[in-house]
Image (spheres, rainbow, N blue to C red):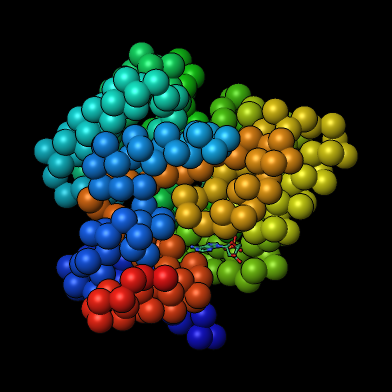
Amino acid sequence: MLNALSRSLFLALARRPVLASLLVRGGMRRPDSFVRRFVGGETIAELVSTLREIDGQGFTHTFNHLGEHVQSAEAARAAVRDYVDVIDAVAAAGMECKVSVKLSQIGLELDRGLCLEHLRQILVAADRRNGFVRVDMEGSRVLDDTLDVFDTVWGEGHRNVGVVLQAYLRRTEADLRRVIERGGRVRLCKGAYNEPSTIAFRSREDVDAAFIRLMRLLLSEGTRPAIATHDPHMIDATRTFAHERGVAPRDFEFQMLYGVRRDLQEALRDEGYTVRIYVPFGPEWYPYFMRRLAERPENVRFLVRSLIDEYVGRPAR
Ligand SMILES: Cc1cc2nc3c(=O)[nH]c(=O)nc-3n(C[C@H](O)[C@H](O)[C@H](O)COP(=O)(O)OP(=O)(O)OC[C@H]3O[C@@H](n4cnc5c(N)ncnc54)[C@H](O)[C@@H]3O)c2cc1C
């Protein structure tokens, strides 16, 4: 009950940046701060150095320039320019360009046509660098539009694009079958938003059962599946199923968030699996950071301790 309350509270705070950024305004200033554990830096230079470190440890990466729900066409255009700059900078540093983008950041809620044009620009920029663009999935309000934009660029022949589907939504099996039929690439995750029980499974058991069902479908029939989870049970189920079906480790990948369950990331890497780390970066880290807090009560305790340390001048743990 307490967990559910704190989850709802932090998801609500995620939508009130001004109020709650006061709480964590010092969050990015120190390299050892709690925010930096989840966010790969605020600048392109910091991102490049984080990606270099990740690649050097034997992982692969995808980066996300943080931002969502832009309020103007100019802000959406600026986000696209930022993406193109980051793609060029990461390629110039000799690293692969795997991008994750939220369509609400490039204008989905303002004008679908504008968003489509913006996504095309990012796809072309990534393609020039041999890169790949994953369309993140946001709240259910924009789900149909997100899938529609994905379908449109796919139909136009763009092949360096994939999409995310969320196991907690009751409709996802149908969506997954449709994307698989078209040959599209899917990242499967549990889902990070607060959705009503009319459209989403709410209990852990139901979400986990759906995740396993969908993972099996994706691994059996999908193209280059990405299994995004830190849940050891979901990881075991994936490993076991892949082994039983003869799906080789090179034919799918695990994906995890930067700073989350580094022990599991290393263990899977050491077993020979591809582990892609999702690295968010940029000044607009606040809503992303709040969703990570909402996922785990221990994170809130950790944050409070860090803030106390910060304000009384002791090193953050
Ligand atoms: C690469 C990647 C991309 C994603 N993209 C999307 C997306 O596009 N749309 C979307 O809705 N969601 C996305 N998510 C988030 C996802 O939906 C879940 O909210 C998140 O991954 C937590 O679920 P879990 O599968 O890790 O399992 P859980 O059961 O929630 O967590 C399992 C264990 O992982 C650890 N853990 C989980 N979260 C945290 C945390 N924040 N801090 C510390 N430890 C933690 C804990 O040990 C926990 O017990 C993405 C996740 C990943 C890994």
Q: Is residue 256 above or below residue 127?
A: below
Query: Residue at 48% across / 19% down in the picture?
Result: 159
Q: Nearer the viewer, residue 204 or 274?
A: 274
Could you tell me residue 229's position as x and y percent? 60, 52
**Residue 157 placement: quadrant:** top left
Q: How many marks?
A: 0
Residue 103 x, y percent position in the rendering: 33, 41
Residue 119 shows in the view:
yes
Q: Residue at x 31, y 76 (%)?
A: 314
261 or 202, which lies in front? 261
Q: Which residue is most to the front?
A: 314
> Does residue 208 appear to the left or right of 305 in the view shown?
right
- Locate the N terminus by quadrant: bottom right
Report if residue 213 is visible in the image.
Answer: no
Q: The C terminus appears in which quarter of the rendering?
A: bottom left
Q: Is residue 246 left or right of residue 172?
A: right
**How far across and how far down the image is residue 300, in percent?**
42, 75
Q: Front-most of 161 and 228?
A: 228
- Return the residue found at the far right: 244
Q: Residue at x 77, y 51 (%)?
A: 237
Q: Can you tell which quarter of the image residue 243 is in? A: top right
Kindly indicate the quadrant of the structure image that contains residue 123: top left
**Which residue is at the far bottom?**
2
Residue at the spot x=24%, y=42% of the render?
43
Left or right of 260, for residue 65: left
